[in-house]
Amino acid sequence: MIKTISAVLGIVISCSCFLISYVTGNLLDVVIKVVNLVVAPLFVLFFMALFIPFATNRGSVIAGLTSLLTAVLIAFFEIFRIKVLWIMPAALITGIVVGVICSYMESKLLTLKK
């Protein structure tokens, strides 16, 4: 099954290379936007798992989704007129802050129920 998925994805990606001429704007900016969309959210998940002792599953998922949403808003909608190079720092800080707050609140609620 893995070989089939790899073959299909390889064919799809190879065929999509013919569509690069239809990309509007600077190709470097487009690549930076797309690549940086998932780097910060993934690091937020690792950060929550490794450095936050009270991190919860729900808080970490909310942190990752918030970080991804922030990256998409900055990359494609230029929210607050933030430039492309600030995608990763803004998404990282947003995800970590939201994750720590959500995890802390959830862990405190769980201790109050006991």
Image (cartoon, grey):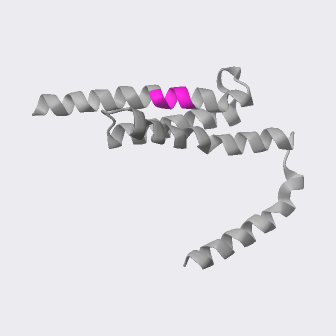
Q: Residue furthest front?
A: 50
Relative side of 105 to 19, left or right: left
- Classify 22 as above or below 107: below
Q: Quadrant of residue 59?
A: top left
Quadrant containing the C terminus is top left
In the rendered image, residue 94 lying in the magenta stretch gets the answer: yes
x 60%, y 44%: residue: 38
x 20%, y 30%: residue: 109
Magenta region, residue range: 92-96
Relative side of 70 to 54, left or right: right
Q: Position of residue 57 (x, y in %)?
A: 34, 43
Quadrant containing the N terminus is bottom right
Q: Position of residue 87 (x, y in %)?
A: 66, 31
Q: Position of residue 29 (x, y in %)?
A: 80, 38
Relative side of 109 to 64, left or right: left
x 30%, y 33%: residue: 54
Q: Residue furthest top?
A: 80
Q: Main secondary structure of the magenta part?
A: helix
x 65%, y 20%: residue: 80
Q: Position of residue 70 (x, y in %)?
A: 57, 32
- Classify 54 as above or below 28: above
| Of residues 15 and 32, the one drawn nearer to the viewer in this rendering | 32
